[in-house]
Amino acid sequence: MMHGASEKIAVSEAQRKRLERFFDKLSTPHFFKIEMVISKLQQLFDLCRIDYVTPLRCFDPAFDLAEEAGKDNPPEFRAAALPGLGAFIQDFYYLGHDFSVSKSMAYAMVALYELRPNKGEHPGELVDHLRTVNSILKHRLNTAILLNFYRILQDNPKADMKKARIRSDSLAIYIANITAVFKSNQRRIQYELVNEEMAAEIPRLFDNQPMEDLAGYNVSSSTLLQTIFETAFYWVIPLQVLNKFTELYFSENVRTLLEDFYQNGLFWNHNYQKSFSLSVAQCSRTRERIALFEHSFMPGGENYDVITAIQETDVYKRPSAEKMTLRIHGVNDTARLILEEETMRLFSLHEKIKEIFDDMKKKEPAIISNLRMLVLDNIEKKNQLESEMPKWALFFDLIQHYTTISPLSRG
């Protein structure tokens, strides 16, 4: 193994050990307290999303939130029938039972507020608002008052309301996300190691002819994905190899030769003829399938959102790293499927071609009775394909290096 590869493996292992130590530190009481504050912030967020306008209109039917915005003109409070407030009471109790604003929450809110690009109020005004909210929760809409209202509505002194279960899973989600990113980076390093090992073999396969980038699914896009979202395209190089291989070694000459074999050949076994014909037809569509995959990254294509995500300069408009990791996982699965299926089709055809070439050497061909006549009519094409068969073997050996990560059956 190359020196650079050994260094990458050592770095990856050291990172894994550091990550384990970091996760151990997250299990301390200090972080559990932070997690509780985060869960309370989520509870406050849910409380803020409740419809407060409808219950206010029970007291002041003319109240209009849009008209009152920015005015010091509170709604009138007239006597209101309690049944009209039933839904609000249940919603508020469900989300806000036993809720209060702590100092830790206030500090967290201010910290979050400071992250906003366009700040309107002074942080001190935000703290004043939180004090007001806390006062209302403590003296006007506390658990006991809401429950008594509900019992009056139900005419049942023992009636009770449902309470939301406060989830404290922020740390678990954070650990899961960090673990997913780490595993993604490990997979990327694995593929980079394979690419490095194959760097010397690819020029030999193509006689130093350069490989063309695929549209969308290429090294440039993968680098941006890694920089912005800590994920990457894993199958760029092998797909390029597949595309270049079919261009050079499944050329028009080769296709017409093979088509002549199944169209004009007198096969002893009709099923073998059908199987051979199907293999040629399938391999003839490999580049078309790759082209369709490339087209999916164009405007209107199913993968165009990936391109817009890496081109988006506003960090607040970008999708989250977690969402993009899942998204790219799906794209990589599609690329892997194309690679594996098309390589298996080429391998199946390769085996049949070898059988026919071996049959050609026999005194009495056992597959195609008029094989020698067909070969004489296409001698240059036959010689070309026969001379390129070692390249086919090299191609399969090269692709097999990638299938140690995603096994490719060659049976």
Image: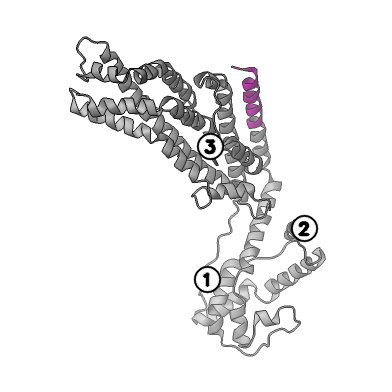
**Distance from the alpha carbon under mark 2 to that under mark 1:** 37 Å
Q: What residue is disc 1 on?
A: 161
What residue lies at 20% left-to-right and 29% top-to-bottom?
Answer: 271
Q: Residue at x 62, y 76 (%)?
A: 52
90 left or right of 313? left
Front residue of this view, candidates 90 and 223: 223
Amino acid type, mark 1:
Met
Q: Tell me which segment is drawn in magenta.
A: 1-16
The kind of residue on which mark 2 rests is Glu
Instruction: Please give left or right for residue 263 compared with residue 350 in the image.
Output: left
Please say if 259 is above or below 149.
above
Disc 2 and disc 3: Cα gap in Å? 43 Å
The answer, for residue 97, to whether it is visible in the render is: no
Q: Where does residue 47 sit, x and y in percent of width and height?
A: 62, 68
Magenta segment main secondary structure: helix
Would you name the residue on which mark 2 appears? 114
Q: Identify which residue, 51 or 101, lies in the foreground.
A: 51
Residue 249, placed above or below residue 112 = above
Q: Residue type at mark 3?
A: Leu
Look at the image and tell me in which quarter the C terminus lies. top left
Q: Secondary structure beneath disc 2?
A: helix
2 or 3: tag closer to the N-terminus: 2
Which numbered mark, 2 or 1, is in the foreground of this view? 2
Q: Residue at x 62, y 79 (%)?
A: 53
Query: Which quarter of the rendering shows the N terminus?
Result: top right
